[in-house]
Amino acid sequence: MIMLSVNGRQVELDEGSSLLDAAKAAGVHVPTLCYYPGLPAQAVCRMCLVEVEGNQNPQPACRTLAKDGDVVQTDTEALQTFRRSNAEWLLARHPNDCMRCEVNGTCQFQRLVNENQWEERWPKVPLGPADYPQELSTDHTSPSIWRDLSKCIECGLCAEVCGDARQHLHVIGFGERGFDRRPVTVFDEPLSETNCISCGQCTLVCPVGALIETPHWHDVLHTLDSRRRVSVVQVAPATRVAISEEFGLKPGTVSTGRLINALRQLGFDYVFDTNFAADLTIMEEGSELLARVEAATRLPLFTSCCPGWVNWVELNRPDLLPNLSTTKSPQQMHGAIAKRSAFAQSLGPEFAEGRAEPYVVSVMPCTAKKDEAVRPGMAGDVDHVLTTRELARMIRSRGIAFGALSEDGQFDSPLGESTGAAQIFGASGGVMEAMVRTASHLKGTEDAPSLEWEVLRGVREGIKTATIPGIGTVAVCNGIAAAQRMLEEEEWRDDFVAIEVMACVGGCLGGGGEPKSMDPDILQKRAEAIYSIDAQAPRRRSYENEDVQALYASELAAPNSPAAEELLHTHYAA
Ligand code: HC1
Ligand code: SF4
């Protein structure tokens, strides 16, 4: 342990802590723009400069190790002048667009300028070289992610998260040097022409509005307000936990009921649960796994509910496409059932054949789900996809006091029932654990004590494995980098019968559309909340979902039947 003082307060810290950690421990706020927990310190914005006794020059707190006996000052007049000058420089390169900007209210630069009342003193200087074509600075080609380089503050976090620090995709990197430095794609190609998998991690770490999810919320409000179509909304497992953070509730607060009430107030006619379709996914995917094991073909089976992962396979390893499960993701299944099944007619006369097709919206923690919704072969199942952040914007724009809503909201029936197994889809390892619970039952090897597969849980990046009696060894790749590492080894083909891959570390609870958080333990808190919902669920195995059973009885006959194949499965393209 080391001892030091920050603004006269003594703090004790582990060795290896930074001066930023020390300030936090002392309860002192040091401003940052280019710092993000878990990513390498950039130390480029110079907002976190602090004075350390004995050092002539101020030090960036994010990248300077705290030493025993340090005496640190964070808010001297000289530091305030440094910060103001740096901010003025950034202001000169930033448009005055805050009032209509999608990140208004959550932008860290806006908040800092506002808190300090810094002024714009210099003429505007656009980002990049003088001859940089302005049409290249705005890129709306991706169905999932919008880029606006004119808002970039060159913090470097997008390149870090897309590169070696997290995703190992290297779609965005830094081009040019010095004054012309800016984040670019290879050859400045639009995102849609690159190997971007749409995971949106760059939008999560961007401190400003330079990288955002492709916004759908304006269109959704417009369609709801027109009241021309029966509207259906489905809610992903990870959203009901993380949305709480957007409204100041404690991280890890479960807000399922509040969320349902908010969606009704927004004007949705039916509020359904993506988890219903997650149970259905397990019936289809679990049966697919058993059939492949039986026939000893196309093994290992890769899960396919993460569109970031599916995109990665299509772009980088088309040879693995036969191994991907053909089962649609829960989002797409839910849309297909709400729109195209005879079962949907039981929802009410407005769903009966011949009437206008329902308008289906999904709320997801994921930017790649926007891309999935327009994929060939699945386009039309879901009309619009909102991220958790976008839904929060909608709720705020309609003046709904989310925190004051009651937790008593209930999903509509029948596309609202689900089990605990569906809920854990939102965490890394959850899809595999859910599949194991049902596959063991279908195989007749069900073992009650193994309902909870602890070894498959956990939010830390990496690979987890478990051997399932009667089925074989399964693996979970937590993050697209872990999957890439695994595929570099040759043994994976022989070692596993099934592999779950979620592109975002932590699984969907760490998705690119989740609330922005500077809490280093946020993934763990969200995961605990997700597993608590499962632990309290009256039914915890997907085959126990009675509405799923009713759907098979009334329309689909059995998992992987021709009717199920037609409605609930898809194909992939190299
Ligand atoms: Fe996910 Fe899924 S778990 S992919 O992460 O299979 O987005 O939450 O909705 O479709 O159910 C996301 C989450 C989500 C799907 C399910
Ligand atoms: Fe989307 Fe989840 Fe995949 Fe991330 S892990 S890209 S949030 S589906």
Image: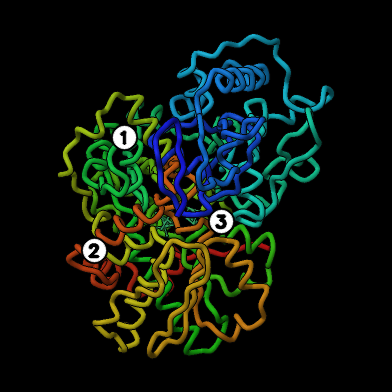
Residue located beneath label 3 in the image: 308
The residue under the point 35% across, 71% down is 434
Q: Position of residue 393 (x, y in %)?
A: 39, 30
Q: Position of residue 28 (x, y in %)?
A: 42, 33
Residue named by callout 2:
547
Foreground pick, 526 / 9 = 9
Amino acid type for the residue under numbered disc 2: Asp
Indicate the amino acid at tag 1: Phe
Coloration mode? rainbow
Q: Which mark is residue 416?
A: none
Q: Mark 1, residues whose alpha carbon is within 10 Å: few (<14), some, or many (≥20)?
A: some
- Give the mark toward the camera: 2 or 1: 1
Q: Nearer the viewer, mark 3 or mark 2?
A: 3
Q: Which residue is mark 1?
A: 247
Q: Earlier in the sequence, mark 3 or mark 1?
A: 1
The kind of residue tagged 3 is Gly
Left or right of residue 322: residue 111 = left
Secondary structure at numbered mark 2: helix
Q: Mark 2: few, some, or many residues within 10 Å (few <14, many ≥20)?
A: some
